[in-house]
Amino acid sequence: MTTIATSGPISAQSRGWLARAWTRNGAGYMFLLPWFIGFFGLTAGPALVSLYLSFTSFDLLTAPRWIGLDNYIRIATADPKFMASMRVTFFFVLVSVPLKLIFALAVAMALNRGIRGLPWYRAIFYLPSLLGASVAISVLWRQLFAGDGLVNSFLANFGIEGPSWISNPNYSIYTLIVLAVWQFGSPMIIFLAGLRQIPQDMYEAAELDGASKWRQFWKITLPLLTPVVFFNAVVQTIEAFKAFTPAFIISGGTGGPINSTLFYTLYLYQEAFGFFRMGYASALAWVLLVIIALFTAFSFLTARYWVHYDD
């Protein structure tokens, strides 16, 4: 009798609290419902399924068979193409991301000088990023750097015989790096916004002290811009790790020549949809997730030593 008498008011109180909470926030939750459905149905749900499949042998035709850590052991010890794809991917990330950021910052600083027609220049420079690494852009890039493409036709005007850039393993990866750097519009816009936040009186004071433009850049612009550099570096590195379409189109889905354009994502695609080793491909996907997570964690841990905020 005592338990029933005690639980009754608590239950009624809880129902009243839930009713008031729904009255205050119900409309907001209803607006968020499509996002919740998309997140759990298209992101979190498939991610958990892929985690389970990474411990199985699954070929889409038969039921998954649990094999424990065999997929991960094979990745670590018996898969030479995994190491080849990692080398290509890390080289691409370590070269393309700094070059893109440097180029984007240089263009942003030029636009920040108050030139006429600034909105038009912003739109033109942002257009490649807006198009993204689409199939059409990748096909265009393949035509530009083919043996008889526009690049070699231009070089022929100066008596230079260019190689077939995309079919030569010494140059093929650099065509993808140039494509990545060409799509510098997104970090450029963010750099431009950051430059607009730097107080001009700091430059005026530096000029009165006789500081050169180069010294102003190293002592004022770059330190105050480090939060923006940090953000762009993290975002662009994650995007570089996920690059897929250009390598797929330019190499014809093979990662050639001689695995010189075998991005990690392309190798994952081959395992999943070329050989139907879905369990192994899921393990590869989770390894990539761990690599990106470790990089992001390392970036945030080291940011305290070089990222300068107002305080």
Image: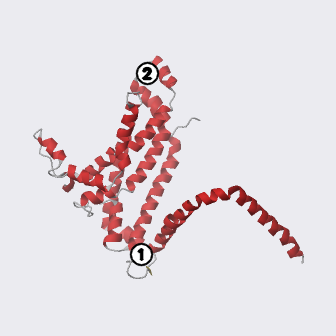
Camera sees residue 140: yes
Q: Amino acid at mark 1?
A: Asp
Q: Residue furthest left?
A: 159
In the visual, does 198 lie left or right of 172? right
The disc label shown at residue 70, or none: 1
Decide: is 220 above or below 288.
above
Query: Residue 105: x and y, percent?
Result: 39, 37
The structure residue drawn at horizontal position 68% and vertical position 56%, both measured from the top left corner, is 25
Query: Residue 7: x and y, percent?
Result: 83, 71
Total of numbered circles in the picture?
A: 2
Decide: is 48 above or below 180.
below
The structure residue drawn at horizontal position 25% and vertical position 51%, both measured from the top left corner, is 140
Quickly name the residue at label 2. Answer: 211
The structure residue drawn at horizontal position 30% and vertical position 48%, both measured from the top left corner, is 179
Camera sees residue 78: no
Query: Residue 220: x and y, percent?
Result: 47, 29
Q: Amino acid at mark 2?
A: Ala
Quadrant assignment for the N terminus: bottom right
Quadrant housing residue 277:
bottom left
The structure residue drawn at horizontal position 81% and vertical position 64%, both measured from the top left corner, is 13
Decide: is 308 above or below 200.
below
Q: Which of the colour schemes (rainbow, by chain, secondary structure, one colour) is used?
A: secondary structure
